[in-house]
Amino acid sequence: METRSGIDKRIQNLSYSGLLNLHSCPRRFQLEKLSGRVDSEDIDSGITFAFGHAVGLGIQYVFEGRSEQEIYFALFCQWDQDIFAFNPKQNKSLWLAIGAIQSFIAMRSCGFLSDWELVYVDGKPATELSFRISLPDGFKYRGFVDGVLRNKVTGKIMVLECKTSSSTNLHPAMYKNSAQAVGYSVVLDNLFPDLSSYEVLYLIYLTKGMTYEQYSFSKSYLQRALWIQELLLDIETIKLYESSGVYPMHGESCYSYFRECEYFQNCTLSTKYLEKPLSESEEISYEEKEKVGAYQIEVSINDLIESQLKRGELL
């Protein structure tokens, strides 16, 4: 699937996690897009993804006011791994995910975030809000917001970002300047056009200690002006790699998070031996996802720039 510019559409679909790969190792970014390989084929990786999704979903349902029985049944239904699958290194399983939600419910009963309520849009809870930004030359940036909260007293708006971590040492620097949090302004622009700043609360469940950590950061729309420029620079970088036919391999990223990269053994081979053309059914599915209206909020880069100009906050 290539565009008229000759760049595969899969390459042109950007996300926060995809850009992390681009920055750490462009070659991995390219192969992850084109090879069709799914890292969750690794059992431990599959459990890790399922665990994080379950905890995030459970926390959203708690804010929606669902009963414990409803929440646990929903987690059971969405768990896509073996029901007794267990990752001992990271202390993750379905039952431990349910335990994490039980801990969160206990925190809420003790007053945690008692002054905050879930925002509702058109009668629907503002959770798992999807957005897509149309960028130059056929590129698109996609993302999801875990939840949007409003302070019952002050009316202040806060984005809730749920994370899980097997680390034993967290630091605010791991989250403070994340581009992911700045991108949430795209959603807030549509929900609250007059908002000048917002808070982002990172709620992180530590799997080994089975406790929650939290970090809160303030984000301004001036920061988004810089984020827009960085996003456009990433696109120009990809176009440069495409025109040269080379995506650099950053050897220092071959081993991270206590494991080797999934492409470590074959990334030096020619791309034509590693890429996987989309089947007809996959291409149909891909086109469905790319239709207008597939995301709850869809804007163009021009919309964002115009919004920044109105605020007088364009760098």
Image: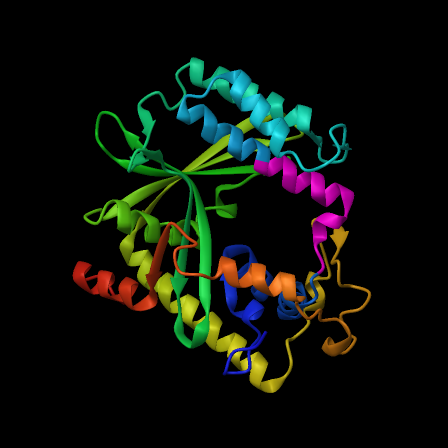
- Which quadrant of the rendered structure holds the C terminus? bottom left
Q: For the point 60% across and 61% down, which residue is it?
A: 21
Asked if 63 appears above or below 309 in the picture, the reply is above
| Residue 244: x %, y % from top left | 60, 86
Task: Indicate the quadrant where residue 121 lies.
Answer: top left
Q: Which residue does the image show at 39% across and 55% down from the upper left? A: 293
* Magenta stretch: dominant secondary structure: helix
On the image, which quarter does residue 309 sit in? Answer: bottom left
* Residue span colored magenta: 37-53
Q: As drawn, is 201 to the left or to the right of 47?
A: left
Q: Name the residue at 74% across, 78% down.
A: 272
Residue 98, position as x, y percentages in the image: 61, 23
Q: Is residue 278 left or right of residue 103?
A: right
| Above or below, comparing residue 131 to residue 274 in the picture | above
Q: Is residue 123 left or right of residue 211?
A: left
Figure coloring: rainbow
Q: Tell me residue 210's x, y (percent).
A: 62, 25
Q: Between residues 301 and 255, which one lies in front from this camera angle? A: 301
* Residue 178 visible to an observer of this rendering: no
Residue 241: where, in percent of width, then height? Answer: 58, 79
Q: Nearer the viewer, residue 267 or 84?
A: 84
Residue drawn at point x = 65 percent, y = 75 percent? 248
Residue 39 covered by magenta stretch: yes
Residue 16 visible at all: yes
Dividing the image into 4 quarters, which one contains the N terminus? bottom right
> Does 236 lie within the magenta span?
no
Q: Which of the 4 quarters of the picture holds residue 157?
A: top left
